[in-house]
């Protein structure tokens, strides 16, 4: 079974070889806002080994010293997000899925940057980025590459 998606011009396509996406979520952090040009990023994941680029190759931008974001170099569609650490997960943008309805969000991240007028998924649990000591340690050395 595969969950498929791709960019708006069709030059870059992917297949997630899973039965269902993992950890569908939205992130309100400023980096995700800038990366998508939206008020939040909607993402759903799988093991990196389960994602196959089936047509074309995405371009990648290191949005920070900790993360890479994939996009179509022709039409600009944001396609993926992955930490550069040994984490074995990659996330695709829910809007790029052929069936985005299959990825109902389960959690929100980056609540500290949530835009006040955004009233969305109020009943979905959320957390503030860097709220725990482990998260603070993880982000401590991050260098933001976005202006």
Image: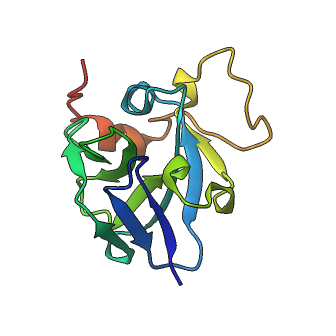
The outermost residue toward the right is 123
Q: Where is residue 125 in the image (x, y as percent from the top left)?
A: 70, 44
Q: Residue 119: x and y, percent?
A: 74, 25
Position of residue 114 relative to residue 76, above or below, is: above
Relative to the observer, which residue lies in front, 51 or 143?
51
Labels in figure, total: 0
Return the x and y of residue 80 as percentages of the image width and height.
37, 51
Q: In which quarter of the image is residue 100?
A: bottom right
* Image quadrant where one finds the C terminus: top left
Quadrant assignment, res 130: top left
- Is 28 on the left-hand or right-hand side of 52? right
Residue visible at 52% across and 33% down in the picture: 110
Q: In this view, does 77 lie to the left or right of 56?
A: right
Between 44 and 94, the residue placed more toward the observer is 94
Q: Percent from the top left, x then y, of residue 57?
A: 22, 59
Q: Residue at x 49, y 68 (%)?
A: 4
Q: What residue is shown at x 30% (from left), y 67% (from top)?
A: 53
Front residue of 131/59: it is: 59
Please state if 8 lies on the left or on the right of 119 as rendered: left
Q: In this view, does 43 lie above or below 55?
A: above
Residue at horizontal 47%, vertical 61%? 5
């Amino acid at each position: 079974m595969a969950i498929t998606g791709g960019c708006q011009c069709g030059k870059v396509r992917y297949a997630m070889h899973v039965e269902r996406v993992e950890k569908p979520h939205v992130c309100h952090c400023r980096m995700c806002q800038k990366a998508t040009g939206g008020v939040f990023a909607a993402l759903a994941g799988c093991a990196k080994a389960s994602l196959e680029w089936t047509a074309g190759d995405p371009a990648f931008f290191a949005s920070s010293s900790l993360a890479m974001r994939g996009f179509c170099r022709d039409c600009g569609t944001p396609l993926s997000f992955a930490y550069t650490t040994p984490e074995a997960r990659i996330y695709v943008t829910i809007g790029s899925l052929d069936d985005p309805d299959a990825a109902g969000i389960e959690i929100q991240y980056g609540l500290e940057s949530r835009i006040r007028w955004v009233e969305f998924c109020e009943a979905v649990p959320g957390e503030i980025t860097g709220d725990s000591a482990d998260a603070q340690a993880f982000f401590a050395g991050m260098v933001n590459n976005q202006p």
